[in-house]
Image (tube, grey):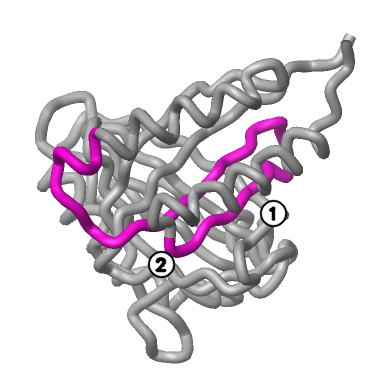
Amino acid sequence: MVVLVDELVESLKHFSLCTESLGCVHSAVFRSIHGNMIIWYGAWMKRSNENKELLNATLLSMLTNVSSMAILIDYSFFDAYAGESRDGSPAAKFFTGDTISMNAILLHKNNTNDLSYALLAIFKSHLAKMDGVVAGVCLKCHSQTRTVNLFVWKSLQCCYSWILKSDYRKTLLPFLDHLPFEVKYDMFRAVYVSGDNVLTPSHIEAPFGRIQPFKGI
């Protein structure tokens, strides 16, 4: 059976609506521009670990509705610990159709604080120099020594231009040369945003589910 990616996106939109009854403040669906990766994003106000475990179990059980369409390859809670927008607000704001880039860094030893501080330093030193960036946010994973920098761009062309001009060895290594790490980078299109206006401030918890659709035969 061939399952179109559009059907999966529609199912995740319905999933987003269902999470509102669980206290989800904002949600969005990001679709990879160059691959078949899809990310579901949801934002909650911070809660206790016990409530978080219950929420986690509930969300995973609800995602069984899309199990015939795709494989859930990763699911984690993240804390947003820094954010900034060109309009001066401490948040990353995005809308349907926006270009989103993410660089995720996984540390090969258990020292999350070192990685978080390093990513924050990279974020602060580069955001003002990144022509075409509208906003950005730093996220720290609860379950792994992994952090993510998320950037919202004016256009896909602006994102490409920055990638072509930037040098990974000059932008990352000075901050991370003392840490064993692995970097992953991808660009996404926001194909759905609840209320068409999502804020990612520094006082929320944001579950990310990375979903890979089955390939049609």
- The answer to whether residue 24 is above or below residue 54 is below
Residue type beneath disc 2: Thr
Nearest to the observer: residue 137 or residue 12: 12
The answer to which of marks 1 and 2 sits earlier in the sequence is 1
- The answer to whether residue 125 is above or below residue 181 is below
48 part of magenta stretch: yes
Residue 40 horizontal/vertical position (percent): 55, 43
Q: Secondary structure at mark 2?
A: strand
The residue most toward the front is 21
Residue at 63% of width from left, 37% of height from top? 38
Nearest to the observer: residue 110 or residue 195: 195
Q: Closer to the observer: label 1 or label 2?
A: 2
Residue at 50% of width from left, 22% of height from top? 73
Q: Secondary structure at mark 1?
A: strand
Residue type beneath disc 1: Arg
- The answer to whether residue 98 is above or below residue 3 is below
The span picked out in magenta is 25-53
Residue at 38% of width from left, 64% of height from top? 137
The residue most toward the bottom is 87
Residue count near mark 2 (Cα–Cα under 10 Å), binned few <14, some 14–19, many ≥20: many
In which image quadrant can residue 2 be found? top right
Residue that mark 2 sits on: 200
Residue that mark 1 sits on: 189
Q: Tell me if residue 185 can be seen.
A: yes
207 part of magenta stretch: no
